[in-house]
Image (tube, grey):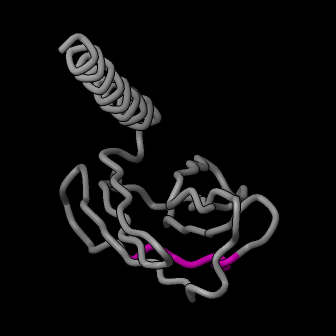
Amino acid sequence: MRIVICLSVLLFSLVNVHVDAREKMNQALEKSGNLRHIMVSGTQGHYLVKGEVKRTKEKWYYTVEDGHKEYVKEKQVQIRKSQEKWIPFQFEVTLPRGKLPHNASLLIYLYQKGNEGKKNIFPFVLERLE
């Protein structure tokens, strides 16, 4: 019985840490002023990325890499025109299963690009692969 209670407390703590970390990340994103509520889901080369961007003149882009190799070259995030302060977006990323890295984390970098080049670069883990 003690083991079950200890495991339950440990599991609850780990879930809370994960939720707290996600909440802190979203708070930090919102403080940056341009991106919030990012959610990444999917596995084995099929991913869905969604969130909200603040209406600005700069466009949003993304790349996918593992720190050594680029799997998706720069692509523009399609964001609908809106007068809302925050605009929802979502897009899919698909990679051939046979080309996925081994023992690596697959990362997506969301960023804005203006006259000065890339700015507001935000990395997110798509998947940790073994």
Q: Is residue 111 visible?
A: no
Q: Quadrant of the N terminus?
A: top left
- 100 is higher (above) or lower (below) than 9: below
Kindly report the secondary structure that dominates the magenta region of the rendered protein.
strand
Furthest toward the front, the residue is 1
Q: Quadrant of the C terminus?
A: bottom right
19 relative position to 77: left or right? left
Q: Is residue 33 visible?
A: yes
Residue sitting at x 28%, y 17%: 3
46 relative position to 90: left or right? right
Image quadrant in which you'd find residue 70: bottom right
Q: Nearer the viewer, residue 23 or 86?
A: 23
Q: Position of residue 125 (x, y in %)?
A: 53, 53
Q: Position of residue 61 (x, y in %)?
A: 54, 68
Q: Nearer the viewer, residue 53 or 25?
A: 25
Magenta span contains residue 37:
no
Report the span colored magenta.
71-78
Q: Position of residue 76 (x, y in %)?
A: 51, 76
Q: Position of residue 94 (x, y in %)?
A: 48, 83
Furthest toward the right, the residue is 68
